Amino acid sequence: NNTYKGPNEERLNIPHTLLVTALGRVPDVRKCVTMDLKEPGNLLYLVGETRNELGGSHFELVTGRTGGAVPTVDLERAPKLFAAAHAAITQGLVRACHDLSEGGLAVAVAEMCFAGGVGADVTGLPGELPDEAKLFGESPSRFLCEVKSEHAAAFERCLAGVPVARVGVTVAEPRLRVAGANGEWLIFVKLAVLKEAWQKPLRW
């Protein structure tokens, strides 16, 4: 029902809109981690499991395709994954972190790159999945983390017991490259082009 009964008992037609907002208390704001990549020469880790879940995704919206499995939450694994990622962040092992949601990994890494003005090479996407599922699948409870090479071992220890894979590196060149399963570049684009594509719809 898209009507709302106001104080004067008059029915008002209001379109369906759902906004979910979450707030969290942070004991020490100095330990907060932002999404922008910080510097070249760091490692990129994918935390969480990517499944072939393109049903209802932004990828399907853009391409006009339908069907497929929709993302599902693993209620047993998710809390463990969040706790492990939080431990790594509070220990100062994570330089940048971004959730993988609408648009999947491809959108998350693009946003991290142009937000920080730092490029990336993604060459190790895990799993026996189609490239489009690896890039644009929206499986929940996943993060992309930037980690200094000297912190790699400690970071991996924090994430022991949950899915984690080293998938790439940050680079000085202002571009994003992502390789497919056959080693060919699926994405090879300048950060300025990505940023313009992201900002253009916001210019009303």
Image (cartoon, rainbow, N blue to C red):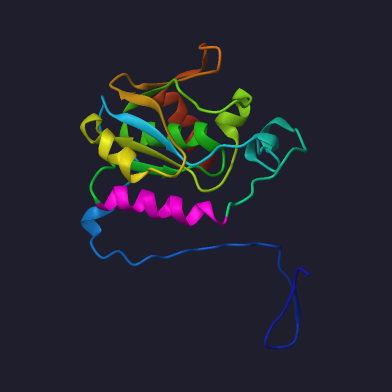
Q: Main secondary structure of the magenta part?
A: helix
In the rendered view, tell whether residue 68 sits above or below residue 180. below
Residue at the extreme front = 161
Q: Provide residue 8's location: percent of width, then percent of height.
A: 71, 88
Q: Provide residue 169's location: percent of width, then percent of height.
A: 34, 25
Which quadrant would residue 149 be assigned to in this image?
top left
Which quadrant would residue 29 be assigned to in this image?
bottom left
Q: In this view, does 8 lie to the left or right of 123?
A: right
In the rendered view, tell whether residue 42 sits above or below residue 79. above
In the rendered view, tell whether residue 38 sits above or below residue 185. below
Residue at the extreme bottom = 8
Q: Is residue 11 left or right of residue 43?
A: right
- Between residues 98 and 11, which one lies in front from this camera angle? 98
Q: Provide residue 102's location: percent of width, then percent of height.
A: 56, 43
Q: Provide residue 107's location: percent of width, then percent of height.
A: 50, 35
- Between residues 181 and 197, which one lies in front from this camera angle? 181
- Between residues 85 and 187, which one lies in front from this camera angle? 85
- Between residues 110 and 196, which one lies in front from this camera angle? 110
Range of the magenta residues? 75-90
Q: Which residue shows up at 67% across the image and 87% down it?
A: 7
Q: Which residue shows up at 53% across the image and 39% down it?
A: 49
